[in-house]
Image (cartoon, rainbow, N blue to C red):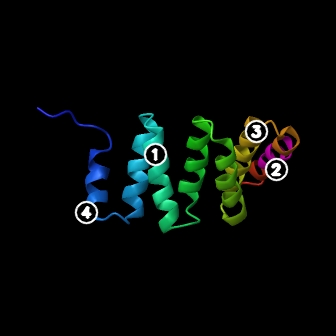
Amino acid sequence: TSTWNPWSFFQQAVEIDPENVVSLIGLATAQRKTQQYTAAIDTYKSVVAISPNHEAALYNLADVLQRVRSNEESVRYAQRLVETTSTPKFKAGGFYLLGRGYAGLETYTQAEKSLVRGLEAAQNQP
């Protein structure tokens, strides 16, 4: 018997259509949730290559990059998210990730500014 893994369905879908953003997001999410961070980073980057302003991909990519201590790269993706999104929850989340990333880089003034902007954005959500 074979052991089912959470990303097998998405992996098969990506093999059939490597540019299917829905399948790529599903695969990356399964990889992230099973702590396959390097694979998740690569898969989220594939989504961003296809759809440069994909909100969920940018958010999750920035988050996973922080988990592996790539704060500088995380800040770049979080910055792109806050600059391109019009969705309030992603705007707030992007600023939160910017704050965490700047804190990881020990740029505390930028971290504080980003976190404050994230709180402001969160308060303005419908």
Which residue is disc 2 drawn over?
117
Tell me if mark 2 has few (under 14), some (14-19) or many (20+) residues whose alpha carbon lies within 10 angstroms of its own. some
Which residue is disc 4 drawn over?
16
Stretch of the chain drawn in magenta: 112-119
| Amino acid tagged 2 | Arg
Measured as percent of width and height from the top left, residue 30 is found at: 40, 42
Q: Secondary structure at mark 4?
A: helix
Number of numbered discs: 4
Mark 2 or mark 4, which is nearer the start of the sequence?
4
Mark 3 or 1: in front is: 3
Q: Residue at x 84, y 45 (%)?
A: 110
Measured as percent of width and height from the top left, residue 9 is found at: 27, 49
Q: Are marks 4 and 2 in contact (CB under 8 Å)?
A: no
Q: Are marks 3 and 1 in contact (CB under 8 Å)?
A: no
Which residue is disc 3 drawn over?
105
Mark 1 or 2: in front is: 1
Mark 2 or mark 3, which is nearer the start of the sequence?
3
Mark 4 or mark 1, which is nearer the start of the sequence?
4
66 displayed left or right of 43 = right
Which residue is disc 1 drawn over?
40
Image vertical order of residue 88 relative to residue 41, above or below? below
Mark 2 or mark 1, which is nearer the start of the sequence?
1
Mark 3 or 2: in front is: 3
Q: Quadrant of residue 23?
A: bottom left
Q: Which residue is at the front of the view, 65 or 1? A: 65
Measured as percent of width and height from the top left, residue 91 is found at: 70, 55
Report the Cα–Cα distance between label 1 and label 4: 19 Å
| Amino acid tagged 4 | Ile
| Amino acid tagged 3 | Leu
Q: Secondary structure at mark 1?
A: helix
Q: Residue at x 55, y 62 (%)?
A: 54
Report the Cα–Cα distance between label 4 and label 2: 41 Å
